[in-house]
Image: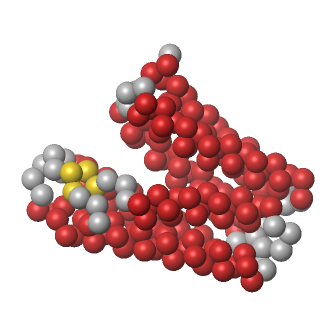
């Protein structure tokens, strides 16, 4: 069972997504606060499952495949829900979702050739900023406030920069790397 705990956390995170979306769609202060708490809990499970899998040497094929999907599902669903209740501009959500899909496809393509593109520091920063900005949008009374917009623009800029970093890393060496070679980070 201990070996499966990271996978259980990943599945739990997926189960939290519709709960969080329904709370956001309530578009009232109390449900929005609960949505932020549910999102925060889901974000903590994302951190915990990775740490547990590495610490217990419990990295599984299921986890490698489903964990990133759970992350994208959580972020994408939260962004879509926030757009639908006018707490986030559509273009911001679109930029983030397009980057997530593009990098996922790039890493998948590299993986089909036996090439691993490691998660970069900028990619980790991007995740941290997104996991902070999304619940912030659920909690602030005025999502159009200048400081909120500034924080979102920083998150979007880092999101785009990390996407460009992954593309350049792939272009720099992954296309010609022998199968099974791990491509270095920047």
Residue plotted at (48% across, 47% down)? 69
Residue plotted at (51% across, 64% down)? 126
> Is residue 130 shown to the viewer in this render?
yes
Horizontally, is 39 left or right of 74 in the view?
right
Q: Above or below — where is 62 with respect to 38?
A: above
Q: Quadrant of the C terminus?
A: bottom left
> Is residue 84 shown to the viewer in this render?
no
Residue extending farthest top: 1
Residue plotted at (28% across, 55% down)? 117
In the depicted view, which residue is nearer to us: 105 or 140?
A: 140
Horizontally, is 85 left or right of 114 in the view?
right
How is the structure coloured here?
Answer: secondary structure
Percent position of residue 164, x then y: 36, 73
Q: Above or below — where is 129 with respect to 70?
A: below
Horizontally, is 4 left or right of 115 in the view?
right
Count of picture labels = 0
Q: Quadrant of residue 139?
A: bottom right
Percent position of residue 41, x then y: 68, 43
């Amino acid at each position: 069972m201990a070996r499966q705990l990271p996978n259980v956390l990943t599945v739990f995170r997926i189960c939290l997504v519709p709960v969080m979306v329904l709370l956001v769609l309530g578009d009232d202060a109390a449900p929005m606060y609960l949505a932020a708490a549910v999102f925060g809990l889901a974000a903590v499970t994302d951190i915990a499952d990775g740490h547990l899998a590495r610490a217990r040497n419990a990295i599984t094929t299921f986890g490698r495949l489903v964990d990133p999907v759970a992350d994208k599902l959580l972020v994408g669903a939260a962004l879509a829900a926030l757009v639908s209740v006018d707490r986030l501009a559509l273009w911001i959500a679109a930029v983030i979702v397009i980057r997530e899909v593009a990098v996922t496809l790039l890493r998948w393509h590299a993986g089909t050739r036996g090439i691993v593109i490691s998660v970069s520091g900028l990619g980790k920063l991007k995740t941290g900023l997104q996991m902070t900005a999304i619940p912030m949008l659920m909690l602030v009374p005025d999502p159009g406030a200048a400081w909120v917009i500034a924080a979102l623009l920083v998150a979007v800029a880092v999101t785009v920069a990390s996407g460009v970093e992954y593309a350049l890393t792939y272009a720099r060496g992954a296309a010609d790397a022998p199968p099974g070679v791990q491509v270095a980070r920047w």
